Amino acid sequence: MPHFLKTLDADFEARFTALLGMKREDSPDVDAIVAGIIADVRARGDAAVIELTAKFDRLELTPETLAFSEAEIAAEIAKVSAEDRAALELAADRIRTYHARQMPEDALWTEESGASLGWRFTPVSAAGLYVPGGLASYPSSVLMNAIPAKVAGVERLVVVCPTPDGVVNPLVLLAAQIAGVDAVYRIGGAQAVAALAYGTDTIAPVDKITGPGNAFVAAAKRRVFGKVGIDMIAGPSEILVIADGDNNPDWIALDLLSQAEHDQSAQSILITPDAGFADAVVAAVDKRLETLERRAIAGESWRENGVVIVTRDLTEAAALSDRFAPEHLELCVADPEGLSAQIHHAGAIFLGAYTPEAIGDYVGGPNHVLPTARSARFSSGLSVLDFLKRTTLARMTPAALKAIGPAAERLAQSESLQAHGLSVTARLAALNEGEA
């Protein structure tokens, strides 16, 4: 049975606050282990990566076989059915079209003083994408990470994807090909992150690392941040559904289970002003769990982390949603756009009963790499902006320098930075002498 709350209950606030602080992921303290792995890769390069891959993935590699060859990729891709290829290509086209609209414009303007100011955007030169490995790997994540990078103009794009026991997902390799990835390395874990950040004889370093992973990968991304950029530290998946009573309980149940089936630490939340509907959804979840392939995982997630909240009205539901700041938010109500206007914190919002979150995972167009663990309060999902840098531009004419330079002199003097001020003073003096 999930956690069941009603906002009219006297102990609601205490129970709700406890839910917000609930630790869902049982992650051991792996930082010391990860620090050792990173140091080893920095010191021994390929040899360390190969040794650690043999230890953790039971796969013997050489520098020449760290990356899939073109022949290997072609052989694996040949196993993909025409239907699966078509689905991936449709998803890729929609993701590419959506992200192309995110590209920002450069700007340059001239002020009345004569000063020219502006900015320009340029891509990072190289990016590395982490993709969890084995048959549980997700080709959709390849598209969601790689396509925004290519749209942004990243010149070199590589994927690291572990293949434990040599198990390969052909769809991942096809997704990499469709997205324009330059190389796919069959390595994973903290050693793969370290190789991307610091480079080895075989693997050239990158400027930014994106993509989800386990606790070791997350810890490695934290440690290499600063040497390279990262997208975010991803936690367990989550969905929050705000629904009124005019919905099919089975549809909402399936939406909740779509995240619960990811792993036991995922969280599914229903907020509704209709107590009878809440009961109907819980019953529908229980019924679906009887036949769901991943019912053991989804069932534990629902029992341990599932939440059902009955509110006074939809406005109260929106306010509670903002406190959760969910990764995925479905608004299954009569006026989803109107309710959406009341929402300030969510990774992605799905409007209306015919927009299940799963559409966003695959073919909707917006990115499915989203902030978790309430980080939507201060961060956004992956976009082309994650692969771009903004550089500011400024040019002073003599007249502009004469107009604003004296203020710079004063501020430099107030901060006791003499050379700062003198760098302006010298130029102003030359200009004044030229006028004499």
Image (cartoon, grey):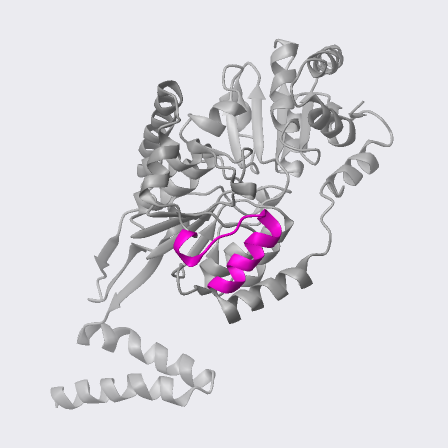
Q: Quadrant of the N terminus?
A: top right
Q: What range of the chain is rendered magenta?
A: 46-65
Q: Percent position (x, y) of residue 24?
A: 73, 40
292 in relation to 341, above or below: above
- Residue drawn at x 46%, y 53% is 209
Q: Residue at x 62, y 17 (%)?
A: 254
Q: Position of residue 231 (x, y in %)?
A: 49, 50
Q: Is residue 390 above or below residue 115?
A: above
- Regarding residue 383, the answer to whether it shows in the image is yes
**Where is residue 331, by image quadrant?**
top right
Residue at the right extreme, as displayed: 10
With 146 as the anchor, is 281 left or right in this view? Answer: right
Question: Is residue 50 one of those drawn in magenta?
Answer: yes
Q: Residue at x 48, y 45 (%)?
A: 161
Inspect the magenta stretch and tell me whether residue 248 lies in it: no
Left or right: 234, with 385 as reference point: right
Q: Is residue 95 visible?
A: no
The one of 78 and 213 positioned closer to us in this rendering:
78
x and y, in percent, of residue 403 in the image: 26, 74
Residue at (50, 45) in percent of width and height: 211
**Quarter the C terminus occupies:** bottom left
